[in-house]
Amino acid sequence: MSPVEWYFARGNKQLGPVSSADLKQFAVAGELLPDDLVWREGLTEWTTARSVRGLFDEESKPVSVEEAPSKPVVPLPKDAEVAAPLEQPVALPEATLPRAPARHPIEVLLESFRSDGGARFVESAARVSRRCGAYGLVAAMVVSAVFASIVTVQTKSLSSLLSAIVLLTLLAVLQYVAGKFCDALDRLNRTTRGILASAVLPDGVGLLSLVAGLAALLGSVSAAVETSAYPLILLGLAGLVVGLYAAFAALNPATLNIAVVSDQSPAGHEAIGTLMFLAKVLLRAAPAAFGAGVVCGTILMGYACCQVFLDAEGPLVAQGTAVTASSVLISSAAFPLVAYLLFLLQSLVVDLSHAILVLPGKLDHSGERVDDEK
């Protein structure tokens, strides 16, 4: 049977999911108050924590209409797992809780990214991006070979053919490497956990990622219009795709294996959680950058083939476009490897920082033991 997942509300914030044991620990530690709202799958309404038998020492009692909590309603997750309760809570009367106050438009926008489809989108988009990257590299190798053949025939020079052989070999190796490291990134995401003290950081990073993606698109359109280099718009579209994906990942921390738990953590521990969160966003965005970049580079290489025949300067301009396309393809295919190395480095920094933070407590504990032995 799946473990129970409880959600609880504090102010206008929904926290969780947490297990039944963790919910009990929050109650014992005073971090969950009897008047706080709690919910699990199977309940038709949010209820006060005191209504859950076994959560507090005092005997629970049903909630009447007059005792209905005055705190705002937090949106209920629609895809929570069905599980047995900690102990069967008292059935709630059909009372309507007061509505939450009006929210800022940006909060409404961010909430739409955190909708039920947000987590599913992150997972499905990662799989689609990996396939686009893998098959896109095959297509890029074919188009690159065609381009090299055309340029070789027109220029009667073998230099383009030799360059194409080097490029094809490199792309073939990178296709294999990218697939392996995408698997490694997925494993690291599943096996490493993190904790954030609030949802402020995910909201901020998600909003900035969205703005960065839109800025990349608008900037590329502006540059394309000014220079008449319209293929630049492809790079802006790739940036928009990566920005949107990073925004969805940041606003759904569960897909990053990050738990948002409201507590009074010291600044040092919060800094560690922040570093881990940022590293996880980079790790999660790697497949999207891989797929979007490879598709963009492949299209640019195809455009270079057309330039050989359509542009007045022929092969010379086309070779410049092909060099840009090759750079995009190589950097995109190498991105999973770079993200893997950066994540390992970040994890090392996090582990060292954590060791430094817990060292004073261990020294104090050792000193107490020495005093007791004396």
Image (cartoon, helix red, strand yellow):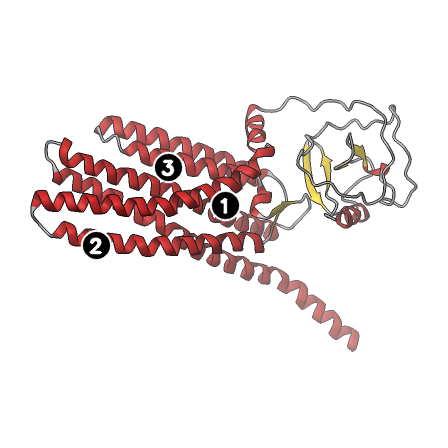
Label 2 sits on residue: 165
Whole-percent x, y for residue 160 in the image: 15, 49
Q: Residue at x 32, y 47 (%)?
A: 138
Q: Residue at x 53, y 55 (%)?
A: 187
Distance of mark 3 from mark 1, alpha carbons? Answer: 17 Å
| Pointer 1 local density, CA inside 10 Å: few below 14, some 14–19, many at least 20 | many
Label 1 sits on residue: 281
Q: Amino acid at mark 3?
A: Ala
Distance of mark 3 from mark 2, alpha carbons? Answer: 27 Å
Give whichever of discs 3 and 1 has the lower sequence position: 3
Compared to residue 145, the image places residue 214 above or below, namely above
Label 3 sits on residue: 238
Q: Amino acid at mark 1?
A: Val
Q: In the drawing, what numbered circle is on residue 224?
A: none
Whole-percent x, y for residue 357 in the image: 61, 59
Give whichever of discs 3 and 2 has the lower sequence position: 2
- In the image, taking residue 184 as reference, residue 367 lies left or right, namely right
| Pointer 2 local density, CA inside 10 Å: few below 14, some 14–19, many at least 20 | some
* Labels 3 & 1 near each other (Cβ < 8 A): no
| Pointer 3 local density, CA inside 10 Å: few below 14, some 14–19, many at least 20 | many
Q: Nearer the viewer, residue 93 or 365?
A: 93
Q: Quadrant of the C terminus?
A: bottom right
Q: Amino acid at mark 2?
A: Ile
Q: Secondary structure at mark 3?
A: helix
